[in-house]
Amino acid sequence: MVQVNMETHLLGANELLARRNRQLFKDHKVLVINLMSSPGSGKTTILERTIEALGGQLRLGVIEGDLYTDQDAQRIEKKGVKVIQINTEGACHLDAAMVGKAYGQLPTDKMDLMVIENVGNLVCPAEFDLGEDFTAVVISTTEGNDKLRKYPLIFRQAKAVLLNKMDLLPYTDFNLERFKNDLDQINPSATVFMVSGRTGEGIENWTRWVFEEVKRKNPF
Ligand code: MG
Ligand code: ZN
């Protein structure tokens, strides 16, 4: 009983901070995407591709959430983008307080797009609003077909779902029809992108869509 109350309290506090982040993002005219997936789905590779495609047109910033290492942040930094690393020291999700603190270290009034790469986990990241404009979830063909039904919340909230590792599809048992049917049941309004971070297949559809979302929030 006590635990339940504490959880409610924590989520309440997070909601307040998420609201504050959202207002800051609005004031600073930056579109913020919370990028989520299970570990190894290819978030960082997709982020690298996104930076390659949009870095010349938009001012970008990245917040990297990881349990311990800064390997992903280093990969992003190599692409010439300002990145702030959050090490959660074991916590399996980012919360609005962590993001608010990291955001303050970025050139806040000089960004058009900020991507938050969340900790690899399909469960509780979905329960913590960070103040983002929307969430995008990556799932890969090598993860099998059961993830949508097992973790419906994260897919239900997503504005975009990226099916990654399309280049490996012929070598897996992943069933595209079943994926589409499951997503139709859970979240029929999600925009779906079939991509390969490795080969670059389909990435342009995703980055063009992101560009339009940035312009929609802040016409320039
Ligand atoms: Mg990563
Ligand atoms: Zn967690």
Image (cartoon, rainbow, N blue to C red):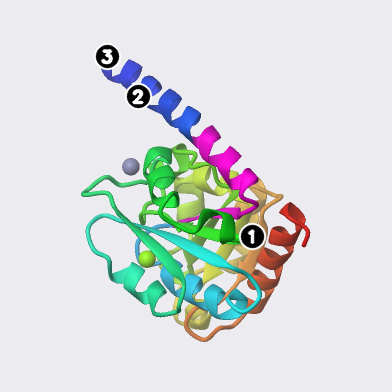
Q: Which residue is mark 1?
A: 180
Point out which mark residue 7 bears: 2
Tell me the kind of residue under disc 1: Lys
Label 2 neighbour load within 10 Å: few <14, some 14-19, many 20+: few
Q: Where is 181 relative to 48, above or below?
A: above
* Residue under the image location 48 percent in, 60 percent down: 145
User: Dividing the image into 4 quarters, which one contains the C terminus?
Assistant: bottom right
Task: Locate residue 30 relative to residue 77 in the image: left or right.
Answer: right
Looking at the image, which is closer to me, 104 or 54?
Answer: 104
Q: Where is 169 relative to 144, above or below?
A: below
Choose mark 1 or mark 3, whichever is in front.
3
Q: Where is 192 relative to 131, above or below?
A: below
* Residue under the image location 49 percent in, 28 percent down: 16
* Residue 86 found in image quarter: bottom left
The segment highlighted magenta reads 18-36
Choose mark 1 or mark 2, whichever is in front.
2
Tell me the kind of residue under disc 3: Val
Name the element at disc 1.
helix
User: Is label 2's Cβ within 8 Å of ligand 2?
Assistant: no
